[in-house]
Amino acid sequence: MKKANRRKPLLVVGVVALSLILGIWIEQQGGLSLLINRTISFFVSPIKKDQYLVKKVGNPCLDTHWAGDLWIYSNNKSEPKQITKGLCIGEILGLSPDKRYIAGTIEGWNGGSRTTSLAIVELGTGDVKVIKPGSQYANYGVGYWLSNIDLVNFIAPKIGENNLKIESINIKNKDSKIIGEWPIGVLFSGNQPFSENKQWAVGNGYNMDEQKPYTVELFSYDQRSKTKNSIIDGKFIKFITWFGNKIIYADKVEGKNTIWAIDANGVNKEKLGNLEGEEISNFAVTGDHKRFIYSVKTKKTNTPEIDVDHNWFSFDLINKENKKLDFDESFVAIQSLSRDGDLGAFVKKDSHELFIVDLTLLKSNKLCWAGDNCQVVWP
């Protein structure tokens, strides 16, 4: 009996100690509410197939490069959900493969100077983690994910260096490692530069060979062997996308824009078809890399793209079919396409309003009063 009584104080002390430890851990996680939301988002994706992310300009951010907050919109036009408040996101850079995080830049001021930091936002909670502060971040292009926790960043060369370094950053502990280097004259393309198996990256830049002035060269980089391969060069080379582990690019042959597929090591070149028009003005690739949409001006002119009507086309990489798209509005630019290509974000002529377009029905709905005010990213 006495032993049992002696155990009670020990039990109380243990419970109190455990409660303190649990309380400290919950506080480190950002509080109970944040912890609950984070747990839910671990099992249930915070963004669904029929939803998309939108960065909208906010009033406190009007002087910081059109920065704004993050929202989730639904295709069924239900009320949007605000994820961040007063964050001043400059650009959404990429959604993690598990759709739990979004990488982006955060604009701000420090001592009278503008800063751009690399950060991630946890969609289920709105929690923000700065991965690289503004003083260390070089805006050469980021937002490509190698895994659910490994984010790619480009490091600008120091004075006297010629190579752009590619680093992988672990978003959990912020540890980073250099995974490759790239000649400073070669830049990664705007679309996903990594192959499906993440072994290869593709980039393009001007040929430095004096015998081939003013030509563009397409390169691939093998992360395993740390070697760079020259794929092809020409005056009109344009990287389109990866299709599996093949590079899809456009080249002008006898006045026609031709689509080609080629292996990452530069062999097994295959012609897929021709595109309409002499000059591609806009293009965007679906998230599944099976189709891309492009436009050509209706007439030759030196005026900006936004002042001229465009004809729009869709190229199917599986069936190798090129189809004209007749929209209910006149669009002059495309911002992005959904993964399956059913929806797209387009900029309207003259007004520059941003519309969400149903590419099956070819019907559109206005999202923002100006394309610069919104950025759309699809799951």
Image: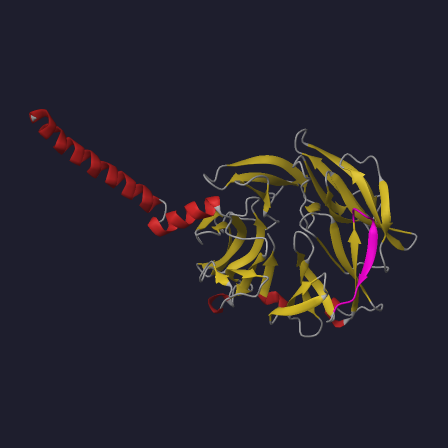
Q: Going by the picture, which residue comes out furthest to the right?
A: 254
Residue 312: image quadrant is: bottom right
Residue 203: image quadrant is: top right
Q: Position of residue 299 (x, y in %)?
A: 84, 69
Q: Is residue 256 above or below residue 57?
A: above
Q: Is residue 11 above or below residue 134?
A: above
Q: Is residue 378 magenta?
A: no
Residue 182: image quadrant is: top right
Q: Position of residue 116 (x, y in %)?
A: 52, 54
Q: Which residues are magenta?
A: 317-327
Residue at horizontal 69 percent and vertical 55 percent from the top: 341
Q: Is residue 85 above or below residue 165?
A: below
Q: Is residue 111 above or below residue 242?
A: below
Residue at horizontal 43 percent and vertical 59 percent from the top: 111
Q: How many marks?
A: 0
Quadrant containing the N terminus in the rendered view:
top left
Left or right: where 68 falls relative to 316: left
Q: Going by the picture, which residue comes out furthest to the left?
A: 2
Q: Is residue 322 magenta?
A: yes
